Image: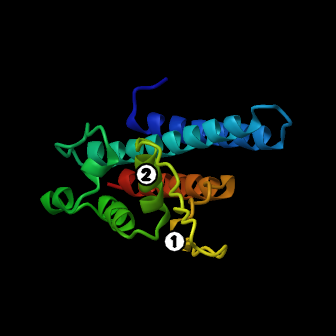
Amino acid sequence: MAHELYTRTNQKIYFAGLALEAMNKAGEGRAMNAQALVQAERESAVFHLYGALLGLCHEIAGFYRLPQANAPRVELLLTQQVLDQKAIPELAELVELAQAPQTWLAQLVATHAALYQPLQAPKKVKADVFQPLIVAVNLEDEAPQALSRETMEEWRQNLKGLAIRFRDGLNEC
């Protein structure tokens, strides 16, 4: 493998694709542990997508010779403080995407961060023996839906498109 920054990004994008394919196969399979396999591949895909984003950040930071070029986390590079040090259009676009919570990039970063949070037990409704059988339920506390393969594939394609577009711009200098 070449020792160029872009190779790590490409590798992570490829690995995310492999994880998504394996997730799809596990979901179609009838194995007893199919649900566990799907979850494992989902987490693997998120891990590799985050790694690809970090690789892309390293490419940009390396090209512009930023002091944060070896940052171990995306969150350390995609800040306004880093952007204030040097005006970098590619980094500015990533910072803008990361700071808007509804964007795919912000969701990817949040999903990756959630992988490292401890599991939370679902809240139980306390039963009162004197209450009638009708129980009030708070719908806001429902468990979040599992991240779909289609959503992660969309993130992968968006990341791939950004990498290609940014590299074209970086090579023009």
Q: Position of residue 134 (x, y in %)?
A: 65, 76
Q: How many marks?
A: 2
What amino acid is labelled 1 in the image?
Glu
What's the residue at 49%, 40% (across, down)?
47
**Residue at the image position 51 percent from the left and 45 percent from the top:** 49
Label 1: how many residues lie within 10 Å, few (<14), some (14-19) or many (20+)?
Answer: few
Residue at the location (50% across, 57% down)? 123
**Which residue position holds label 2?**
167
Q: Is residue 67 above or below residue 4?
A: below
Q: Relative to 72, does residue 90 appear above or below in the rendering? A: below
Q: Position of residue 130 (x, y in %)?
A: 56, 71
- For residue 73, which quarter of the picture? top left
Query: Within 10 angstroms of label 2, few (less than 14), some, or many (20 or more) residues?
Result: some
In the picture, measured across the screen, residue 87 lies left or right of residue 46, that is: left
Q: Which residue is mark 1?
A: 140
Amino acid beneath label 2: Arg
For the residues marked 1 and 2, what is the alpha-carbon distance in whole angstroms? 42 Å
Disc number for residue 59: none
Q: Secondary structure at mark 2?
A: helix
Q: Quick one: 6 or 96, which is closer to the camera?
A: 96
Q: Residue furthest front?
A: 130
The location of residue 170, given as percent across then percent down, is 36, 53
* In the image, farthest residue toward the top: 1
- Find numbered disc 1 in the image and state the secondary structure of the residue it sits on: helix
Q: Residue furthest right?
A: 30
Q: Residue at x 38, y 70 (%)?
A: 100
Q: Of callouts 1 and 2, which one flags the residue occurring earlier in the amino acid sequence? A: 1
Percent of width and height locating residue 95:
32, 62
